[in-house]
Amino acid sequence: MGRHKHNKGKKSGWKNKTKWEDEACCSAVDKLSLDEEQPGENKKDFGRGFPFPLLMWDLGHCDPKKCSGRKLDRLGFVRSLKLSQKAHGIILSPLGQKCLSPEDHEIVAHSGVAVIDCSWAKLDETPFGKMKGGHARLLPYLVAANPINYGHPFRLSCVEAYAATLYITGFKDLGLELLKRFKWGKGFYDLNRELLDIYSSCKDSGEVVEAQNKWMEDLKLKKKQQEVDDYDMTTIDDSKEHWNPNRNFVEVSSSLSDFIEKITWNCLMCYISHGNKISHSPNYYQHAVTGR
């Protein structure tokens, strides 16, 4: 009997140990959503089917009802971080020394993307230095499609920043999944598709920067040409403003003179036909009206 009790006690202890190990494993899995996934591990689902984590430091600057980052958090796509927590994937930050490029594909696939949710009006108050990580990056030139900053370059919302990163690094379908959660979202890809295709075809950060600079230089040239065209439209000769610009001014004037001459002669003939006498020859009247 004593032996059986002793064995039972060992079995109970083994169960308790197994329970503790299971809890430790669960804790480790939770930690993977914040820290870098360990080599050799199977792919995890980090939220709504994403194979890597989407993280966000929320500074609380934005209206919760308008903040795209918070909406993605509520929908389960994104996990918010505290300032003291690190992100081991790509971090979109103004402190970055490199531009995002396709060569960052493996970092995104392995460790995900983190954004900083702050107001563009409060950049000076944002403690960027406290948000730690090993792969800070700058996004290249892109134009916002969100209702608040539509048409403004660089002023992207959180969801646009995620989507741009995913497109450039080879995960554009996942980026579209995020954009579809917003009525205006798909417009971001439509508005920037040509640029995004150019960036995603580059080899590295240097090529992305070159492509960006060429694009911006072309925009400047187009703007200057438009200014020249607008100026040309304001320097049209006012003396011709009532004439058809597809006809020569002299030709139109000559035609008008002929028309006046014809009318004058008709009136003169009508005057004579009613029995009125004239004191001058017809050539006199022609010269008086037409200058001939």
Image (cartoon, rainbow, N blue to C red):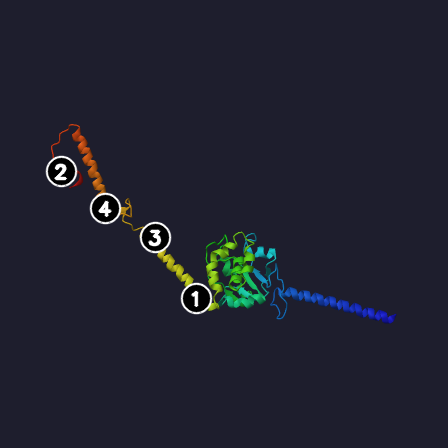
Check disc 3 and report the residue beneath it: 230
- Tag 4: Cα neighbours inside 10 Å, few (<14), some, or many (≥20)? few
Report the residue marked by disc 4: 251
Disc 4 element: helix
Q: Residues within 10 Å of mark 3 (few under 14, many from 20)?
A: few
Please give the label number shown on residue 210: 1
Labels 4 and 2: the sequence-earlier one = 4
Look at discs 4 and 3 and give the one toward the viewer.
4
Q: CA distance from mark 1 to mark 4?
A: 54 Å
State if disc 2 and disc 4 touch (CB < 8 Å).
no
- Asked if residue 145 lies left or right of residue 227, the reply is right
Residue 72 in view here: yes
Q: Amino acid at mark 2?
A: Asn
Which residue is found at the position 17% from the left and 30% from the top? 271
Q: CA distance from mark 3 to mark 1?
A: 30 Å
Tag 3: residue type? Asp
Q: Which is closer to the viewer, label 1 or label 4?
A: 4
| Mark 2: secondary structure | helix
Task: Please name the residue that numbered disc 2 is placed on.
Answer: 283
Quarter of the image with the C terminus in it: top left
Disc nearer the start of the sequence (4/3)? 3
Residue 201: where, in percent of width, then height?
Answer: 48, 65
Q: Is residue 22 left or right of residue 222?
A: right
Instruction: Give SS at disc 3.
Output: helix
Which of the pair 161/275 is nearer the observer? 275
